[in-house]
Amino acid sequence: MSAVIPTSSPPAAAPRRDTPLPWLQRPDVQRVFYPAMVAVVLIALWQGLVTAFEIPVFLVPSPGRVAQTLFTDAGLLFGALFTTLKITLLAFLSATVLGVVIAFAFVQSRVIETAFFPYAVLLQVTPIVAIAPLIIIWVKNPTASLVICATLVALFPIIANTTLGLRSVNPGLMSYFKLNRASRMQTLMRLRIPSALPYFFGGLRISSGLALIGAVVAEFVAGTGGTGTGLAYQILQAGYQLNIPRMFAALVLITLTGVFLFAAMAVLSRWALGGWHESEVNHD
């Protein structure tokens, strides 16, 4: 009779405990902390160079002088910012609606896309500075003319990205929809649009910045004065008066507005795609 060798059961695994990451190792903190540190270093370097070489204020003002101008001229600058931001948002909204409608039309018919897509490219490669004077002459309302100019600048990324997204569907899923005899509308709503959302939000990030650029360029070309003028006019006036701190302050506001618009589109993309698409689920 063979002896039975007792075997000991393996020890039970200790319950896994999720330890929180250190503060600086958190991805959401890193996305804010690292760029902020770079900005602090650059501003300190700017201040140090201006002070060390005693650069005149009419050439390059120090960051402290720019911040002081932002405070003393806040009423003028932030009023101009509101005007520029209004034109930017109206143009961005118009470009989004028009771009999505045109992309849907392109996807429904290859003939329509082949016939009209080159003209969308033509809008992209035509300098807005060249056609803005004509639009300003043809459209009597100053705000409407500026919005049209900015819309033309911001339109192409929405068209191109949305069209690409609507066509970038999984071939297996497309075959499955055809096998189940799904209608064109059902395929569009349940397959093409969900597949196109990451491309669409990528187009929004690009278009938001281009709408701001288009608004500023259109304001430069229009050169209208008086009340209700945007930041571009304030930059022109500051240049004529050699008020370089105000010019820099206006440029800082334009830059911060562009960063804010891009960040807002990134947050919107994460909110819409974070629960299901790999581009945002695996973002961290």
Image: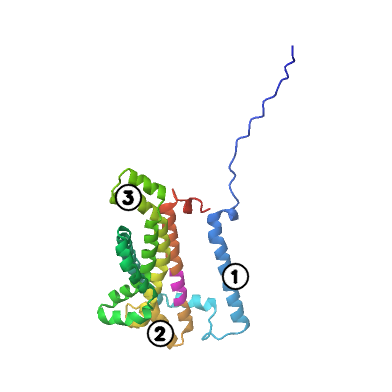
Residue 75 place in picture, x, y as percent: 39, 75
Q: How far apart are the alpha carbons under marks 1 and 3? A: 52 Å
Q: Residues within 10 Å of mark 1 (few under 14, many from 20)?
A: few
Mark nearest the camera among 1 and 3 is 3
Residue at which label 1 appears: 41
Q: Which mark is residue 109?
A: none
Q: In the rendered structure, which amino acid carries the disc numbered 2?
A: Gln
Residue 36 location, quadrant: bottom right
Q: Quadrant of the N terminus?
A: top right
Q: Which mark is residue 187?
A: 3
Residue at which label 2 appears: 237
Q: How far apart are the alpha carbons under marks 2 and 3? A: 54 Å
> In this picture, which residue range is highlighted in magenta?
250-257
Residue 211 place in picture, x, y as percent: 38, 70
Q: In the rendered structure, which amino acid carries the disc numbered 1?
A: Val
Report the residue that reaches farthest toward the top.
1
In this figure, what is the number of numbered marks? 3
Q: Earlier in the sequence, mark 2 or mark 3?
A: 3
Q: Residues within 10 Å of mark 3 (few under 14, many from 20)?
A: some
